[in-house]
Amino acid sequence: MSNILIAEDEQRISDFVQKGLRSAGYDTTTTEDGETALMMARTGRFDMVLLDLGLPALDGLEVLRRLRGEGVETPVIILTGRDSMDEAVAGLVGPDDYLTKPFRFADLLAQVQRRLNEQPATSDSFIVQGGDLQLDVRTRRVDVEGRSIDLSARETALLEVLLRRRGKLLSREQILCHLADCAPASPAVLDVLVRVLGTRIGAERIETPAGGGVRLR
């Protein structure tokens, strides 16, 4: 099982990436500053580093420069909010790949698999099914009792996480972390989204117990 270091100081993004990778079967470790990221990457314990450029203490560019200068060839995928990577690739060996924020987890997973020389995700990986619901994450379309319904990006993200954990009560925090893949959301937005999704696929399919949380029957 591959071990991945996530160097990201935005807690929301770090949690989102970590939960997604763990669900995909990877071991993960997180850090919030560049100096610690550099120290940990030097140990050789990790098969890959996901490296944010805007880290405190030591920025991601300097971390990468030092690693490559010391001969550390661990694959590095840069996570950046910048529109261009010209600055990042200038004067250094460079990252193995990069993603511009905000990014889809499916895109990150595909890059991780490719750089680790693993089998890339097939088209079946994007089909999520539960009961009489079948969701195609790529096309944002769900088949319900013979009907095809087009969903928004947030509706798709919500239904995906509920389908993948069908029958389990998920906290709002867990769901909001997943929704961050398409756009930041608040608990109030989530409540509205749950109601809207219920009108699309059938309100009786979604449970919101009084104690909190959301569950797909």
Image: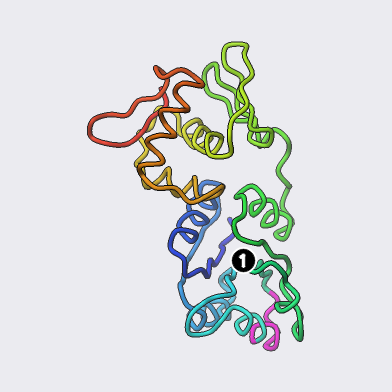
Q: Which quarter shows the N terminus?
A: bottom right
For the rendered model, the colour scheme is rainbow
Left or right: 65 in relation to 200: right
Please identify the residue farthest to the top as the structure is shown: 146
- The vertical placement of 68 against 29, above or below, is below
Amino acid marked by disc 1: Leu
Above-or-below relation of 74 to 176: below
x then y, percent, for residue 174: 40, 45
Which residue matches tag 1?
79
**Image height of 13 relative to 198, above or below:** below
Instruction: Using a 10 Å C-alpha cutoff, classify the residue at mark 1 as few (fewer than 14 neighbours), some (14 to 19) or many (20 or more).
Output: many
Boundaries of the magenta span: 66-73
Element type at marker 1? Answer: strand
- When asked about the image quadrant of residue 41, the answer is bottom right
Asked whether 16 or 204 is in front, the reply is: 204
Q: Quadrant of residue 216?
A: top left
| Residue at the spot 56% in from the left edge and 47% down from the top edge | 182
- The x and y percentages for residue 134 are 60, 23
Number of numbered callouts drawn = 1
Name the quadrant containing residue 96: bottom right
Residue 87: x, y in percent?
72, 79
